Amino acid sequence: MASKTENVNMGYVVFLAVVAAIGGILFGYDTAVISGTTKAVTTQFALNTIQEGWYVGCALIGSIIGVLVAGMLSDGIGRKRTMLIAALMFSISALGCAIAANFSQLVVFRMFGGFGIGVVSIVSPMYISEVAVASKRGTLVALYQLMITLGFLLAYLVNFIIYKNVDESVSGSLMTNMFNSEYWRGMLGCNLIPDVIFLVVIFFIPESPRWLLVKGRGAEASAILQRIYITEEEASKQAGETLSAIGSEVKANWKEIFEPGIFRAVLIGCAIAILGQFMGVNAVLYYGPKIFEDAGMTGDVSLLSTVLVGAVNFLTTIIATVIIDKVGRKQLVYWGVSSMIVCLLAISLYFFKGAALGLGNGFLLTFFLLYVFSTAISISAVVFVILSEMYPNRVRGLAMSIAGMALWVGTYLIGQLTPWFLANLTPAGTFLMFAVMCIPYLLIMWKLMPETTGMTLEEIERYWKSKGRKK
């Protein structure tokens, strides 16, 4: 898309981006709500450490399946229909988790939600990048990450409010138990509200014009582009640029993925995606209350602390959304990840020598919040922007699915292994490991990734092709 905005109907573009980004709320809520339910589910179903990890990680199996099929689905039936499928899966998951009769059913319905997460993690940013202008693409795609953090915050707030009003001595109907003795059902089930909203509003947006052009449906694409751009001339220009980039190759296949320049981009995307999960982000999201309780905080105080984590995450992402196209993707990563290392080392020190040094819970919470700030303004804001813009049109869905699968494999592993890490490496060793894992991420961004701020998708495609021609 064009880099200038004077010929763009920005109100309409923002509307399209916001609707697609609502998928991020479902992603964030479904991901973060688990932190408030783990203790209750573990107790009710008498889970051991491995089963507790499975309860957290099972949804991520669904996510991996979701990202594997998201690219093929979105390239085959379109971005809009694929988002509708994800919304339906989220709705089934929320309702099913609320009424699950046993642990096996709970796991199955969690996987349904995980499938939805995997799909929207690929398709929502992809859709936004394909309707955005280059000069605002980072900001608009970052709206998706902002919605994820809003989902986190909503989940933490719902968890805290439900837990504060629980009377575990009350038992009766399913609805009564849902907010008392089996309060985890209410926490998981409340996601049904944004699920249904997303399902409805998707009907009010058009298909991606880029996808329509790839499919040879130029008339439909032109009609949408004329709603995005003020002049017919500008709309025709954008269609021409996209068709030029697509060329004669309009069908994604595995052979194209292994073209030298594209394969390099896919490998870098996978490395960024999987390494980001071993820098502590999701360990905090999934096990924040458990980590705070290990530090001596009570149940409601630990949940309140996660609300603060969610609030900082959300507010910082607003800042990142505003500055990402001004500061640049790589600069945010350099400063943010460097700060993450300092915070992770401080948290490790707290668990290792905190008592001897007289470090209180205030020290831990301060560096936790600084860590979340550093994460939200850097890797969390940047990753979906980069993955949505770094691949050529004809293979974007397939390439994003591969990188997305790497992301969710890493997320599954960290969700499954964090209880083991905390028990065997101790919290001090676990956070030290996270700090070390930040270093290769920084090196990859420094040496291998271009600064894509302000570049059109077609310019980014030409960059990777030029790298493929170099020997």
Image (cartoon, rainbow, N blue to C red):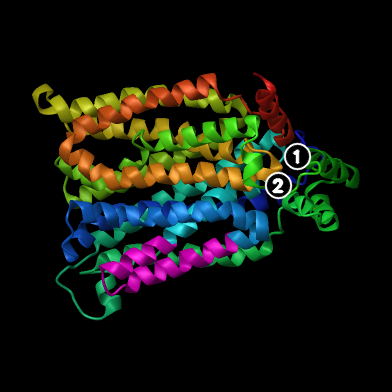
Marking on residue 131: 2
> Horizontal placement of 450 versus 345: left or right?
right
The residue drawn where x is 23% and y is 62% is 41
In the rendering, at what x and y percent does residue 84 appear? Answer: 59, 64
Placement of the C terminus among the 4 image quadrants:
top right
In this view, the residue farthest toward the front is: 255
> Horizontal placement of 426 versus 341: left or right?
left
- At numbered mark 2, what does the secondary structure look like: helix, strand or loop? helix
Residue underneath mark 1: 1
The residue drawn where x is 42% and y is 66% is 93
In the rendering, at what x and y percent does residue 431 appear? Answer: 26, 31
Q: Earlier in the sequence, mark 1 or mark 2?
A: 1
In the rendering, at what x and y percent does residue 150 appear? Answer: 46, 49
Which one is nearer the viewer's eye here, 320 or 188? 188
In this view, the residue farthest toward the left is: 356
Q: Which residues are magenta?
A: 83-112
Q: Eyeballing the image, is 386 above or below 224? A: above
Circle 2 Cα neighbour tier, 10 Å, few/some/many (<14 / 14–19 / ≥20): many
Q: Eyeballing the image, is 467 above or below 421? A: above
Instruction: Say if residue 308 shows up in the picture.
Output: no
Q: Are marks 1 and 2 in contact (CB under 8 Å)?
A: yes
